[in-house]
Amino acid sequence: MIEHSEIATMELIFKEALRLQSFKTLNLGRRHRLDSTYEIYPLSQLSSLLQLLNEKAQKTSVALEDKYKVRYLLDDQFTLWFAPEGPANPKIPAHYQMTGASATAARCITSGNITFLEDWQTIVSINHKSGDFTPDFDSLKWALAVLVANNDRLRLLNIKIAPLLI
């Protein structure tokens, strides 16, 4: 979790005020999920998700482009949440579902995907690819700032950010 004073500092550094992304109501017609049970993971439990995905990747043949990805959402409290990547289904939440709010009330700072090396320990890319929110490219800086601010926590989880990313 990022403190309010750190948010103000980041806004000064970025020379831009924080803007929240709202759910794109154009997609509302596609949202029809009744019996969904899925888990989302905070940054402190990211290694649990990665271990689960590593075990799954070894057992199944997933397309290489999606094999080492997770989806993420940075909520309006500056908490990063993670879930498996893939088409939304009863086990994989859509980005808006990661907020815990209804589609019409869902908001976030940014959302997208994070890609790891095959070892599931090195973050090599991050994007803002979310059909639910379609965040601006500029919103990525907030996700990167939270990752960098939590670098010590990531190290404790044996996760590192590739040098070219920061």
Image (tube, helix red, strand yellow):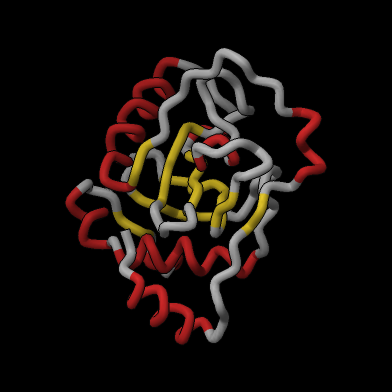
Q: In the rendering, at what x and y percent does residue 24 appear?
A: 74, 47
Residue 129 shows up from this direction: yes
Above or below, comparing residue 160 to residue 163 in the picture = above
Residue 6 position by quadrant:
bottom left
The quadrant of the rendering that contains the N terminus is bottom left
The residue lying toward the viewer, choosing from 148 and 76, is 76
**Residue 29 percent location from the top left of the image:** 80, 30
Q: Quadrant of the C terminus?
A: bottom left
> In the image, is residue 4 above or below residue 155?
below
Which residue appears at 51% of the width and 82% of the height? 14
Residue 125, compared with residue 37, is above or below; it is: below
Relative side of 155 to 71, left or right: left
Instruction: Report the residue at 22% width, 48% height from top.
Output: 158
Image coordinates of residue 37 in percent, x first then y, are 48, 19
The residue that appears at 42% across and 44% down in the rendered structure is: 81
In x, y percent, where is residue 48?
A: 28, 33
Please give the name of the residue rendered at 35% of the width and 72% of the height, measured from the top-left corner. Answer: 4
Q: Is residue 104 left or right of residue 92?
A: right
Residues 144 and 76: in front is: 76
Viewer-side residue, 119 vs 31: 31
Q: Find residue 97 and report its image quarter.
A: top right
